[in-house]
Amino acid sequence: MSFIKNNQNIYKSRFLFKRRLALLTGLISIAFLVVIGRFFYLQIFKYDFYKGLSENNRIAVIPNVPNRGLILDRNGIILADNYFVYSLEVTPSKVTNLNKTIDNLKPIVELSVSDLKQFKKILRESSSLDSIPIKTHLSEIDAARFAANKLQFEGVEIKSRLFRRYPKGSFASHLIGHINRINEEDKETIKKLGWQQNYKGTDSIGKLGIEKYYEARLHGTTGFQEVEIDANGNSVRILNNTPSIEGDAITLSIDANLQDIAENAFNKYRGALVAINPKNGEVLAFVSRPNFDPNHFVGGIDLDEWKLLNESLDKPMLNRAINGLYPPGSTIKPFVALAALENDIRKPPFNIKDPGFFTLPNSGHTYRDWKPFGHGTVDIVMAITISCDTFFYGLGIELGINKLSEFLSQFGFGKLTHIDMFGENAGLLPSTEWKQKRFKQPWYLGETVITSIGQGYTLVTPMQLGQAVATLANAGLTIQPRLIQSIKNSQTGKMEVFKNKMVQELHFKPEHLALVKEGMINVTQPGGTAASVGAGAPYKIAAKTGTAQVVEMKANQKYNPDRMNERHRDHALFIAYAPADDPTIAIALIVENGGHGGSTAGPIARKLMDYYLLKKVSSNKEENKVSPLESEYHD
């Protein structure tokens, strides 16, 4: 029995062993088949994919960043160009201890507090794989010291970088704009526009002005180098090289000499100026004061400096020419006068006896003229010449706000001019519908009264005012203003010249235009509100002065600038075109808190007209002398 039992146990053990062996063999066979299948999949189906990865392990694709296109004035004066500098750069992913590396660099290369602040800022905004400059514009001494100690600093190297330069500093800074480092918002824009491939290796982009508006033409086309590298990351040989194509050169319509005269003429004042050739829409000068130095933005501006610029009461970063909103003051009167004539209101010989005030019909409310005892007998030509408020108060009531605003809109008020620059403000042209929608209130007659002299809700930009006076000078023909004259293709050398783009042609009766023109010419003649501006000019100037209140005056309060805070003083405005019989330049400008347009803003315009028409630079000695009669004007 014991023998039989032992045989049974042996048989059972052998059976279990064979069963386990079969199971194990099956599992091994399945595993082997899986491995063979995987090898087959990788070798046959995924061959191209892994071959590519293998190639990438030994081939580095390095972008060739293109030279940015030049920006020049109409006479070929360079306003923006490029130059190479040596930059000390760190690749964080290749550095074991970043803080220790920076500490070890300090005795070798002079690193300022500003350098380190900027580095940390860029580090936060960048990938650890990026090469980040810790110091740009390395001196020869710093470069030599680092080269001698390079082996101590893994992940740190000297690179040659292309930097943007603005040779004339703060000159025309709002017009030219600037470049700055690409941020997250820029990356989204680049992605949206499908520019990712073309911006590989590029760390800056146009942020303002021409630099931003024409970014696509200025940037150029990025090239690429395929470089074979060894296991240590050192380049062995160049396998393929696609050169970059530099950006196109842009020639502006701006005359740099005229621009320089305009900027210097503002002196300490804040304000803006636009000068346009009414025949073709070319902007000849584009000023916003105060300005800033765009060179400080290249490669990233210091945070403290940015704070000073951004928080300054003078708002140097505000492009006043297209963003500044101001009441037009009496510069609106020629357009209001033309509206009246075209609507058969107050044609000569119609005139009024001006007592120095206007009383609203069916109301006891009185509106003063700038001249307390009035101007006597005034017709529409005289009303423009001496800027008679009383005449225009009544004229505005007869027109009505809706008819007046509808007419003014034809000149571009309340609309974008579509100049080739981002961020333009459309201004404001009020109406009954606008007020009801904005304030849920009806329109009052008294609001029409002050609108007729350029006060109240109406707001314009200097660019709009410039386009309006250019249209008036051009007898109703509106040509879209533009800052660009031509673009030279860097690859073909072909010049693309920009042509005039007519916006509209307004048809006014010649006799009505003649009356408005006569009034504006008389503004710069003896007895006009800007007689000193026209004094001694060998050409005729058609103009209109303007004053815009900054703070409201009480009913019997007399304006005294000497007793006011400087920032509470009235703005001085001036529009003009010349020669009056065949205009080739039209100007609109505002001097913030400058007082009267004729004595403060007018002389600036005269300097520009003298240079543009006569190639003469004014001496500044005679032109600012204001006659006793003219000094009374406060329109």
Image (cartoon, rainbow, N blue to C red):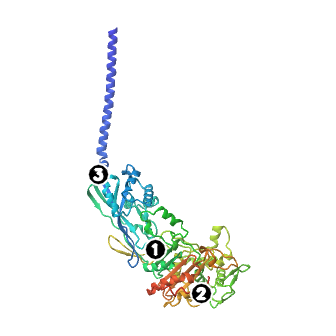
Residue density around tag 2, few if under 14, some if 14–19, many if 20 or more, within 10 Å: many
Residue annotated with mark 1 = 172
Residue 540 appearing in the image: yes
Question: Which one is earlier in the sequence, the residue at label 2 or at label 1?
Answer: 1
Residue at position x 45%, y 70% from top?
Answer: 293
Q: Of tags 3 and 1, which is closer to the observer? A: 1
Contact between labelled residues 1 and 3, with CB atoms less than 8 Å apart: no
Q: Which residue is mark 2?
A: 630
Quadrant for residue 251, please give it. Answer: bottom left
Q: What amino acid does circle 3 point to?
A: Arg
Q: Label 2, secondary structure: give it.
A: helix
Say which of 195 and 589 sits in front. Answer: 589
Residue 122, x across and y down, in percent:
43, 58
From this view, report whether residue 281 is shown above or below residue 579: above
* Residue to which mark 3 is pinned: 58
Give the quadrant of the N terminus.
top left
